[in-house]
Image (spheres, helix red, strand yellow):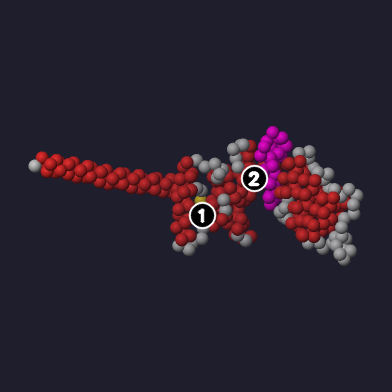
């Protein structure tokens, strides 16, 4: 009798404990589900709020106009330029913020997580999102390029971002390019930054000069100054940034020819590597190589054509052979 009572008592205790555990699990799951739903709703609200406050023109967002400015043909590019300038200074805080894409706040991280989720759903449905092909910083650069001198109010913000030691190399390059696009005032600010030997980000900023598309001559003149300057690391970076063949290809080739005759081996290598991208248009530059070859005459092609018509591989092979012997 006693043993039966104990068993029943134990059974009731066991049953009561099991009921308690089951109820706790159910309540915990409900709490988790509610919290997850709140997080998703919060992300959606934040993303919607940020999306709504981005300036628009003619029912298209600033990001869309910036991408159209870079990717479309001339007619669409001009339309985008007009639209971006119509948005004007209202878009500058967004463009500067996008340059900081590598240093996001928690709110921005939540927004990007939500946007990434939407992009994955679109891709799974067969849709293509052009924003996935360009980073935020690149989109901002397109906007500053279209605004040109109308973006001068952003110069202090761009300079601060470029000088920030916490900025990544990509952000520094994008900020420098954006500064150079704002015209003379931006170039002066960028030149002061690049001439300041205490700035550790200088080697990243020079790339922004070479990417200027409109009125590029002043930017290229600065690059020539730095290639011939005493800072070898900056000279190498400046020569390496000139691998782009436009705009002003003749001026770029002339600058790189001077770099190829530089007494510093690393500067010569960087200049020649960039010059090789110009292909046959750079072949005439081989006539100036003798100055960096310790008196040795330049090698010529098999037909005795004095270097005319060399392809990229020929230029690299010939010039690097001279460098190795100097």
Residue 55 lies, in percent from the top left, at 51, 48
Q: Residue at x 43, y 45 (%)?
A: 46
Q: Is residue 58 left or right of residue 242?
A: left
Q: Residue at x 82, y 63 (%)?
A: 309
Q: Secondary structure at mark 1?
A: strand
**Mark 2 — residue?**
173
Label 2 Cα crowd, 10 Å radius (few <14 / some 14-19 / many 20+)? many
Q: Residue furthest top?
A: 198
Residue 88 lies, in percent from the top left, at 57, 47
Residue 215 lies, in percent from the top left, at 71, 49
Q: CA distance from mark 2 to mark 1?
A: 28 Å
Q: Is residue 79 left or right of residue 205?
A: left
Q: Residue furthest bottom?
A: 303
Q: Residue at x 77, y 45 (%)?
A: 266
Give the extent of the magenta segment.
188-217
Q: Are marks 2 and 1 in contact (CB under 8 Å)?
A: no
Examine the rendering and report whether any part of residue 255 can be seen: no
Examine the rendering and report whether any part of residue 19 can be seen: yes
Mark nearer the N terminus (2 vs 1): 1
Q: Quadrant of the N terminus?
A: top left
- The image quarter in which residue 196 lies: top right
Q: Is residue 320 above or below residue 233?
A: below
Q: Residue at x 46, y 49 (%)?
A: 113
Label 1 Cα crowd, 10 Å radius (few <14 / some 14-19 / many 20+)? few
Front residue (pair 11, 100): 11
Residue 28 lies, in percent from the top left, at 30, 44
Comparing labels 2 and 1, the label whose residue is closer to the camera = 2
**Mark 1 — residue?**
60
């Amino acid at each position: 009798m006693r043993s039966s009572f104990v068993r029943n008592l134990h059974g009731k205790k066991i049953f009561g404990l099991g009921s308690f555990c089951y109820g706790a699990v159910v309540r915990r799951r409900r709490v988790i589900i509610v919290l997850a739903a709140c997080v998703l709703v919060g992300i959606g609200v934040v993303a919607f709020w940020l999306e709504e406050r981005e300036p628009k023109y003619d029912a298209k967002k600033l990001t869309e106009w910036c991408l159209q400015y870079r990717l479309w043909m001339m007619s669409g590019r001009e339309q985008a330029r007009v639209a971006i300038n119509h948005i004007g200074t209202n878009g500058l805080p967004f463009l500067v913020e996008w340059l900081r894409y590598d240093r996001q706040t928690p709110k921005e991280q939540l927004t990007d997580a939500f946007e990434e989720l939407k992009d994955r759903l679109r891709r799974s449905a067969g849709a293509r999102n052009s924003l996935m092909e360009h980073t935020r910083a690149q989109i901002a650069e397109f906007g500053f390029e279209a605004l040109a001198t109308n973006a001068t109010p952003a110069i202090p913000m761009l300079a601060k971002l470029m000088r920030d030691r916490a900025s990544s190399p990509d952000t520094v390059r994008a900020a420098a390019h954006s500064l150079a696009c704002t015209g003379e005032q931006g170039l002066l600010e960028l030149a002061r930054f690049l001439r300041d030997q205490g700035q550790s980000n200088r080697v990243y900023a020079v790339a922004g000069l070479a990417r200027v598309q409109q009125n590029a001559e002043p930017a290229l003149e600065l690059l020539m100054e730095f290639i011939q300057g005493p800072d070898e690391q900056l000279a190498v970076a400046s020569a390496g940034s000139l691998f782009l063949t436009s705009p002003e290809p003749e001026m770029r080739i002339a600058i790189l020819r001077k770099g190829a005759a530089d007494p510093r081996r690393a500067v010569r290598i960087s200049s020649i590597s960039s010059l090789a991208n110009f292909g046959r248009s750079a072949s005439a530059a081989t006539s100036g190589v003798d100055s960096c070859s310790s008196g040795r005459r330049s090698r010529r092609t098999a037909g005795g054509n004095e270097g005319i018509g060399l392809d990229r591989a020929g230029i690299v092979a010939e010039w690097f052979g001279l460098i190795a012997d100097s």
